[in-house]
Structure formats: structure tokens, C-alpha cells
Image: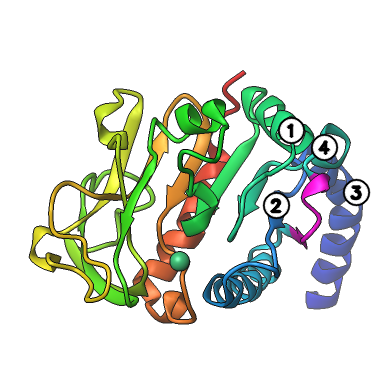
Amino acid sequence: MIKRIRFVSAIFALIVSPVIALAKPAPLHVLAFYSTNVEGDHVDFALQALKFFADAAKRDNFQFESTTNWDDLSSQRLTGVQVVMWLNDSAHSDQQRAAFQQYMEHGGGWFGFHFAAYNDGGTNWPWFVQFLGGAVFYGNSWPPLPAILDVDDKTSPLTKHLTAHFLSPANEWYSWQPNPRANKAVKVLLTLDPSNFPLGFKDTLTGGDIPVVWTNTKYRMIYMNMGHGDRIFSDDNQNQMFKDALRWLAQTPMKK
Ligand code: ZN
């Protein structure tokens, strides 16, 4: 009897599975960009991030690719890519920038870490600044230190498993001026807790409102200031947030 049930199940699976396969959406496709000719601590982070997300891809069955060729920011290469990651650098050439803007304005997804959002007076890319919600790099802490982060929004799928305050592993922390929180389209998810200040020894963040993770809701994007050195992936709760953020980006409907 058991044999017979197995046989029937097998036949059923044969008939039904092609239908299921057709109905399934294409698996998530992520393309991570990074550079190896940048600050050593930023390369260390990128290499760990590649391993972290490649492992997650295997476990959760999504496609994860990486490249150091920023010319892969092209409409041809980005076709079918749901989320672009920038691990430790940014687009430099006009062509790369234009392709990225086009991608994001047509519903692409962006997951940026740490130096990916660095911009200053010499960056000369106004579209990117508004994309970040207006944030321009203002200052940093040094050396890398752990910091207590406050959860701004407990209802977000990215933060729901986090405690209201948690210790984030050692990182170089940036401050921003203008503050992205001043932008109504920006939703800040994590902020440096005031008890951290003064944060740093050589370079010090002395106080104020310093967002760490935010999204500009006009786009399918998330920025996280974590991304300096080889300690970032040492906290399980924070690791879970990285994975949840990727899932959230993948599931957020296209804007256009
Ligand atoms: Zn750094």
C-alpha cells in the first residue's frame, strides 16, 4: 500500500511540478559591486560580505554574483538584476552613473554599505546626493569602535527582531550634513545612541543626531553605515538585519 501511495505521489509530482515551476517567479538575482584598490579595511569588509551573502544565497536559494568591474553598471548587465549591492565603492564614470540612475529610476534595488554613500564637495554627482536623501559626508570616528544603536522604527521588517538598543560591532562611523532625516521621504531605521558620544579618539563624533541606516522611500534602496573592517559580521542580530534587508528590498514592489 505504501509503495502504491509513493507511486501515485510520484506520478502526481511529475504532472504538477512543471506547472509549479512555470508559476514560480524568477529567483532573486543580486549583483554586488566592490573594489580591491581601496582602503584595506574596506576590502576586508567587502570580502567578508561576499562570503556572507554567497552563503545566504545558497541557503535561501537566490542568485548572488559579484564584480569589481564598475562598467557592469550598464543597462545590458543590469537586466534581470533585482538588487545591486555596493560594498565599498561607488560609480565613478559618467556612463556608470547614468546607467545606475536609469536602473534606480526604473525600479531597481540598491543595498549600499559604508563608503558606498561617501560623497563630498569633490564627488560632483547631485543626483546621487538626492538619492541618498540629501546626505553629504561630514565627519567620522576613529579608530573603529563598537557603538550602541537605537531602533527608530520597531515595525519595520528590518528591525522587528532587534532590541530597542543594541551594540553594533566595531565600525568607523560617519556623520552627515545635511542630515538625511530632514528629508520627508527618508525613513531612518537606526541611529547612534547619544550615550556613545564622544565616539572615537583620533577622530571624534561629539554628538547630535546621526542616522546609521535609512531608506529614501522614493526608491527601492537601503543604506547602512556599517562596512569598515573585519568585525561587522560578528553579531548574529545584525547579521539577521542584513539578510532581512535584502529580502525586504527584493519584496518591495517596483516603484515604476
Ligand atoms: Zn571606513
Q: Closer to us: mark 3 or mark 2?
A: 2
Q: CA distance from mark 4 to mark 1?
A: 11 Å
Residue 167 place in picture, x, y as percent: 23, 73
Q: CA distance from mark 3 to mark 1?
A: 51 Å
Q: Mark 1 or mark 2, which is nearer the start of the sequence?
A: 2
Total marks in image: 4
Residue 65 place in picture, x, y as percent: 77, 60
Residue 155 place in picture, x, y as percent: 26, 44
Q: Amino acid at mark 3?
A: Ile
Q: Say which of 31 and 247 sits in front.
A: 31
Q: Say which of 110 and 82 sits in front.
A: 110
Q: Amino acid at mark 2?
A: Val
Question: Does mark 3's beta carbon lie closer than 8 Å to ligand 1?
Answer: no
**Residue placed at 13% from the left, 67% from the top?**
198
Q: Closer to us: mark 3 or mark 1?
A: 1
Q: Which residue lies under the disc numbered 3? A: 15
SS assignment at label 4: loop
At label 3, counting other C-alpha atoms closer than 10 Å, the crowd grade (few under 14, some 14-19, many 20 or more) is: few
Q: Mark 3 or mark 4, which is nearer the start of the sequence?
A: 3
**Residue placed at 57% from the left, 31% from the top?**
125
Q: Which residue lies under the disc numbered 4? A: 74
SS assignment at label 2: strand
* Placement of 77 over or under 167, stated as above or below: above
Q: Is residue 175 left or right of residue 103?
A: left
Q: Amino acid at mark 1?
A: Asp
SS assignment at label 1: helix
Q: Which mark is residue 30?
A: 2
SS assignment at label 3: helix
